[in-house]
Amino acid sequence: MKSGSNLEGLLEKGEFVITGELGPPKGTDVEVVKKKAAMLKGNVDAVNITDNQTAIVRMSSIATSKILIDEGLEPTMQMVARDRNRLAIMSDLFGASALGIKNMLCLSGDHQSFGNHPEAKNVFDIDSIQMIHMVKTMRDEHKVICGDEIEGDFKMFIGAASNPFADPFQYRVHRLAKKIEAGVDFIQTQCIYDMKRFKEFMKQVVDMGLHEKCKILAGITPLKSVGMARYMAANVSGIIIPEEIIDRLKGAGKEKVASEGIKITCEQIQELREIEGLSGIHLMAIEWEHKVQEIVEAAGLLPRSVL
Amino acid sequence: MIIADRKPFEEIKESVKDYNKIMVLGCETCVAICQAGGEKEAEILASELKLAFGNEGKKVEVNDEIVIRQCDDEFMSDTAFLEKVKEADVVLSIACGVGVQHSCNYFNRIITEKPIRVIPGLNTTFMGANIDVGLWEERCLGCGDCVLERTGGICPITRCAKSLLNGPCGGSSNGKCEINKDTDCAWHLIIERLEALGELERIKPVEKYKDWRPSHSGGPRRMVREDLRL
Ligand code: SF4
Ligand code: SF4
């Protein structure tokens, strides 16, 4: 085992996994974390802890991950290259490992101009692909990248993101291949609404045999309202929401729009399970953690097994 | 070339308001070409200052001068010119940041009677090219270890908002960068160019960590050319 994490173990066993997501509070309120954690517990196999997502300052992903461990959940700590240079990343990884964090996600990070401190200077000493390579070097060669030996154990299950909907489309699969070459163990995709384009992407993945070299989890975000769908399509980079989904939400009416959103999500999960090369779902129910159990249950994915 | 932009007039006026003899000093090279700090701009700024202070009933002497390059001693060594510098209370340099610092350093080396005050009238913005009439874009950050050979002649360090060496990121959309729709995604351009050249294979291997020592991260840079030194 590369990390001994539950997520790694389940994926190795060939289980169809489901991961969740938790955004830390914009401050020190631990209760917020605990409340969200309680809603996710038992319903997902691991939980991504975002790292100053959309460049908005929040409780650190390391600290939040540790709180999750204490609450009996398994975190996947996200880490962005925007805010840390190679020294800070490696040092934080030692700290994370010492605190019992076993999964991580290597990301470039949204540009700071999106966030609440657009005046900030960014770092980008290394990019997400180099970060993958760095963590793999640390784990497999037991060295930091300058070649110095690491004192003590360092284990980590290395994840990264892939956006099949960004451009240029024909190059996206090659970028995934690069992440695999760098040493990624698992991939979580951007949320999928355009199933046709995603299937095309997965066909390329399977044709190149990439699904045999790393585990791929399909990203899903349930839509709560027509407004949310429109907002995401317009403001979140690389999200395409087909008109027919928007029409379905509209058609459901104000009262039933949320349940229609959940219904769409369950249908998407069923459709995704049929696609060759996928090993699970990454469910990003943004500020909708209380609906996760309902969704996972309706999708027939409960109970979750724990190793 | 170096691109610069004039500071807001109010900021300039505020910065020189305590002096009676002001010399606006233009530079005939980069900043003249991007029409921020050449001879014409020096004249205009001097007249604007005269007018603004005049309207307030303040008696201020404002002159404008021009040199070919403020980043080189030899273009500033004229005795009559140096005499005028000495007489001024302040030199308002509208060269790039290099010119402001170098003219200041030169004047204070040559003129021993009194310290010379030099302040900037421009914001130096970037190293770039003239893309169209009235349009300049950044092209190089002077990273000290050029990668253009591998990236189809398009610089990812400068033109990618995240300086990614293994791009494009997930924010690239319709050829534009996630930061705004006016900015091309550098990696989209790189892929298109390499595809046209039949060299897409070049970016398939993982580009390793960059050594930033030759860049500004290694501290202020210095270049010694022994073959040129006396
Ligand atoms: S790679 Fe470095 S030297 Fe070359 S254009 Fe880009 S910033 Fe300038
Ligand atoms: S969209 Fe393109 S240029 Fe902008 S940060 Fe991403 S890769 Fe770089």
Image (cartoon, helix red, strand yellow):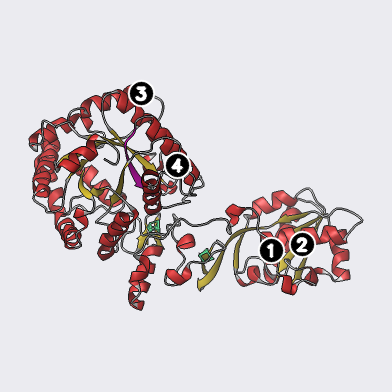
Q: Residues within 10 Å of mark 2 (few under 14, many from 20)?
A: many
Marker disc for residue A90: 4
Chain to which the residue tagged by mark 1 belongs: B
Foreground residue among B6 and A112: A112
Foreground residue among A194 and A135: A135
| Label 1 element class | loop
Residue located 42% across and 35% down the image? A152
Query: Which mark is in front, 2 or 3?
Result: 3
* Span shown in magenta: A101-108
| Label 4 element class | helix
Instruction: Locate residue B104, reporting x and y percent.
Output: 78, 58
Q: Residue under label 2, please give it.
A: B103
Query: Which mark is in front, 4 or 3?
Result: 4
Chain to which the residue tagged by mark 3 belongs: A
Q: Residue under label 1, please give it.
A: B95
Query: Is A231 drawn above or below residue B211 in the view shown?
Result: above
User: Could you tell me which quadrant the C terminus of chain A lies in?
Assistant: top left
Give me the C-alpha separation between circle 1 and circle 4.
42 Å
Quarter assignment of residue A280: top left
Q: Residues within 10 Å of mark 1 (few under 14, many from 20)?
A: many
Give me the C-alpha separation between circle 4 and circle 3.
26 Å
Q: Amino acid at mark 4?
A: Met
Give me the C-alpha separation between circle 4 and circle 2.
44 Å
Chain to which the residue tagged by mark 4 belongs: A
Asked if disc 2 and disc 1 are in contact, CB closer than 8 Å, the reply is yes
Asked if disc 4 and disc 3 are in contact, CB closer than 8 Å, the reply is no
